[in-house]
């Protein structure tokens, strides 16, 4: 098994652990953090109703910080927290999609918690 296969296998294991934690708290909306090679995205999803409550991305025209580094992850966390609080969502479950809780994911979640989201 080469390194790429090992990395994919480890990410799948983390994804299953995160999914289990999310399933155990079904009554709360999910705060999904995802990234591509160029941009960062976050959305709050209410799975019981099957709709997206709010959405924020680093490629929006009014997003102040450009790039995909920790600084833009913090700005995205602040933005999604403000939008979620406007919609009346205070408690969420973080869905990090199998990514390590380090770097951009940590900066994003710390900024969202700092603005008032609870998870």
Image (tube, helix red, strand yellow):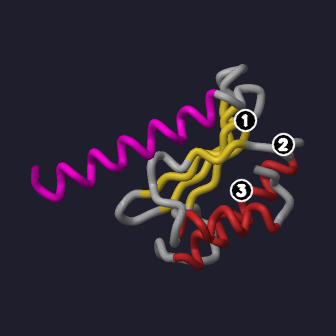
Q: Which residue is mark 1?
A: 29
Question: Could you say where residue 106 lies in the image, as x and y percent from the top left?
Answer: 60, 67
Q: Which residue is mark 3?
A: 80
- Between 89 and 79, the residue placed more toward the observer is 89
- Between 7 and 73, the residue placed more toward the observer is 7
Q: Find out whether residue 117 is within the magenta segment.
A: no
Which of marks 1 and 2 precedes in the sequence? 1
Q: Which residues are magenta?
A: 1-23
Q: Is residue 67 above or below residue 11?
A: below
Q: Which residue is mark 2?
A: 89
| Mark 2 and mark 1: Cα distance apart in space | 8 Å
Q: Is residue 88 above or below residue 71?
A: above
Please name the predominant secondary structure of the magenta segment in the image: helix
Q: Quadrant of residue 70?
A: bottom right
Q: Is residue 48 above or below residue 106?
A: above
Q: Residue at left 27%, top 48%?
A: 8
Do the numbered discs 2 and 1 sit on residues whose CB atoms are within 8 Å?
A: yes
Which of marks 2 and 3 precedes in the sequence? 3
């Amino acid at each position: 098994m080469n390194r790429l296969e090992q990395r994919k296998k480890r990410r799948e294991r983390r994804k299953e652990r995160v999914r289990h934690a999310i399933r155990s708290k079904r009554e709360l909306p999910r705060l999904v953090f995802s990234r591509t090679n160029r941009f960062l995205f976050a959305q709050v999803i209410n799975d019981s109703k099957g709709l997206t409550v709010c959405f924020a991305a680093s490629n929006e025209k009014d997003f102040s910080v450009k790039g995909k580094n920790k600084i833009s992850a913090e700005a995205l966390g602040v933005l999604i927290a403000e939008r979620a609080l406007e919609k009346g969502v205070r408690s969420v479950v973080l869905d990090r999609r199998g990514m390590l809780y380090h770097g951009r994911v940590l900066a994003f979640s710390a900024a969202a918690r700092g603005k008032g989201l609870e998870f």
